[in-house]
Amino acid sequence: MKIIKIRIFINTGSFTMATFDTEIFAETFKNLTSILNDDKYKYKFVKIGDVIIKPVEITRIIKL
């Protein structure tokens, strides 16, 4: 059960992007891109670590 830290960048419609730092399991990180690109979850709220957000608003995810 390896835990990794990620930073999520969210497009707020302004000049700067909001960022959230959170921790998730490594297995979840492997499946994260397929979940975020799936049209079924595009406009639904998804919990990523401590952050609850719609995948359509996510601009970038960086592994720290």
Image: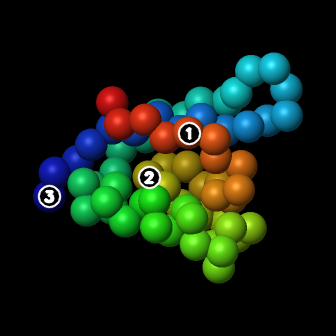
Q: Are marks 2 and 1 in contact (CB under 8 Å)?
A: no
At x 57%, y 65%, the residue is 37
| Residue bearing mark 2 | 49
Secondary-structure class at tag 1: strand
Q: x%, y% of residue 3?
A: 23, 47
- Distance (Cα) linking label 2 and label 1: 15 Å
Checking the image for residue 1, the label placed there is: 3
**Residue at 33% across, 30% down:** 64
Q: Please give left or right for residue 3 compared with residue 19 in the image.
A: left
Q: Is residue 15 above or below residue 25?
A: above
How packed mark 1 is, by other alpha carbons closer than 10 Å (few <14, some 14-19, many 20 or more), is few
Q: Would you say 45 lies left or right of 12 here? A: left
Please tell me which residue is depicted at 66% across the width and 74% down the height of the picture: 39
Q: Are marks 3 and 1 in contact (CB under 8 Å)?
A: no
Residue furthest toward the bottom? 40
Q: Quadrant of residue 52?
A: bottom right
In the figure, residue 25 lies in which quadrant?
bottom left
Is residue 9 placed above or below 2 in the rendered structure? above
* Type of amino acid at the residue the image marks with label 2: Gly
In the picture of the structure, the residue carrying the numbered disc 1 is 60
